[in-house]
Amino acid sequence: MNTRMRRAAVAVAAGAMAVSLAACGSAKEAGDKTKETGAAAGDAIKVGLLLPENQTARYEKFDKPLIEKKVAELTGGKGQVVYANAKQDATTQNSQVDTMITNKVNVLIIDAVDSKAIAGSVKKAKEAGIPVVAYDRLAEGPIDAYTSFDNEEVGKVQGKALLEALGDKAKDGQIVMMNGSVTDPNAKLFKSGAHSVLDGKVNIGKEYDTVEWKPENANTNMAAALSALGKDKVIGVYSANDGMAGGIITALKAAGLSTLPPVTGQDAELAGVQRIVAGEQFMSVYKPYAPEAEAAAKMAVALAKGEKVTGVTTSTVDSPTTKGVPSVLIPVVSLTKNNIKDTVIKDGVYTADEICTDKYAAACATLGLK
C-alpha cells in the first residue's frame, strides 16, 4: 500500500506535463484567467522564493535545493532563484515581498508565515506584474497557482494511526490533541482531518492550538495537560508535526512516565524518524517533497515566461479570497518503524547511517536498518 502511494506521489509530478488541457475541466477555465504577466527574455528568469521558517528541517534541507535544481533544469541553467526565509515572522515576510518587487523578480513562490497577513503583499506583487505561486500553504490574495499535499488527508492519516496504536484501549483514558498554529491554514486542515477520524472513538481530554508550531510551546502545553488530566490518564497524543512531538515527548519523560503513550507526527524529520526507531514516537507523515517542489518550479517557470499553468495542474482549490486556483495536490504516506526502509531510505531522503547513529544502532539492528 505504501509503495503504491509513494509511486502515485512521484507520478503526480513526473506526469503532470502530460495532462491534457481538455482533461483539466475547471482547472483549465481557472488557468485561462491567469494573467500572462512576468514574461522574461527566454530562460533568463528570476524566481523569488520565500519560505516561512527555519526551525522545521525540511525547508532548508529539501524544499529550497529541490526548487533550485528544478528551476535550473527547466531553464537550461539560466534561471536564477532569489531566496529569503522569514524565520516565522509575518512582518519580515511582507518586507521580503517588497524587496522582491523592487528587485523585479519575474515570479514569486511564497510559503506564507501567515496566510491572511500575506494577502496585501500578494496583491502588491500582482499589481507590479509579478505572478504568485502559493507553496505548501494556501496564501490569501490573488494567487495564480498552488501546490501542497492533501492536508486534510494528512490529519486523517495521523488520526487513523493513533487509533491503530491504541487498539481496543482507545477509550480507556484520554488523549491530548496538539494542533499547529492558527496562522497556518494547513493546521486547520490537519485538525479537521484528525477530528473526522477521532471524534466519538476517543476521549479528548485537552486540545491546544500551538503558537508558531514551536516545540517549546508544545512542551509547555503538554506539561499543563499532564498536570490537569493526570499523567496516568493520558493514553495517546495527537501531535500535528515532528517538531512538536519532540517537545511533547520531552514533557512525557519529565513527568516520569515509564511507558510512553503513542505520539503522532508529520514531516519525517530525521529526529522524528530516529524517535520512531527508538519506539518513542509512533508515527510520522512522510510527504514526498520532490513532487511538490517540482510542481512549484514548473508552475513558476511557466508563469515567469507568460505561459499558462494548465499543463501542469491537476485540480483547483478555493481560498477565502480566490476561487478556482489551479493546483497540484500530492498524496502522503504514513511512516512507522515498519516502512522506514521502503520510504525515506529508499527515496534517498536519509541514509541508514544518518538515521542509525550510535544512540540508535541497537534499535536499527532490530529493525534491519543496518
Image (spheres, grey):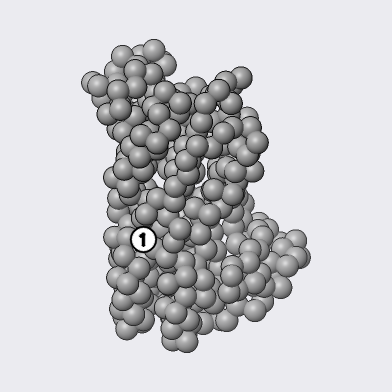
Kindly identify which residue carries mark 1. 52
Quadrant occupied by the C terminus: top left
Residue 218, quarter of picture: top left
- Residue 288 placed where, x, y %? 49, 44
Residue 286 percent coordinates (x, y): 48, 39
Pick whichever, 352 or 153, lies toward us: 153
Rendered view: 355 above or below 155: above
- As drawn, is 168 to the left or to the right of 275? right
Which residue is located at x 42 percent, y 78 percent?
121
Query: What residue is at 66 percent from the left and 60 percent from the top?
Result: 315
- Number of numbered callouts drawn: 1
Q: Is residue 130 visible?
A: no
Task: Choose between 329 and 264: the one closer to the eye.
Answer: 264
Q: Name the image quarter holding the N terminus.
A: top right
Task: Find residue 264 and report its horizontal and vertical position in percent.
Answer: 46, 34
Q: Quadrant of residue 155?
A: top right
**Residue at image x 60%, y 77%?**
34
Q: Residue at x 44, y 79 (%)?
A: 120
Q: Amino acid at mark 1?
A: Pro
Question: Which x, y percent locates residue 170?
Answer: 58, 25
179 or 255: nearer the eye?
255
- SS at mark 1? loop
**Front residue of 333 and 353:** 333
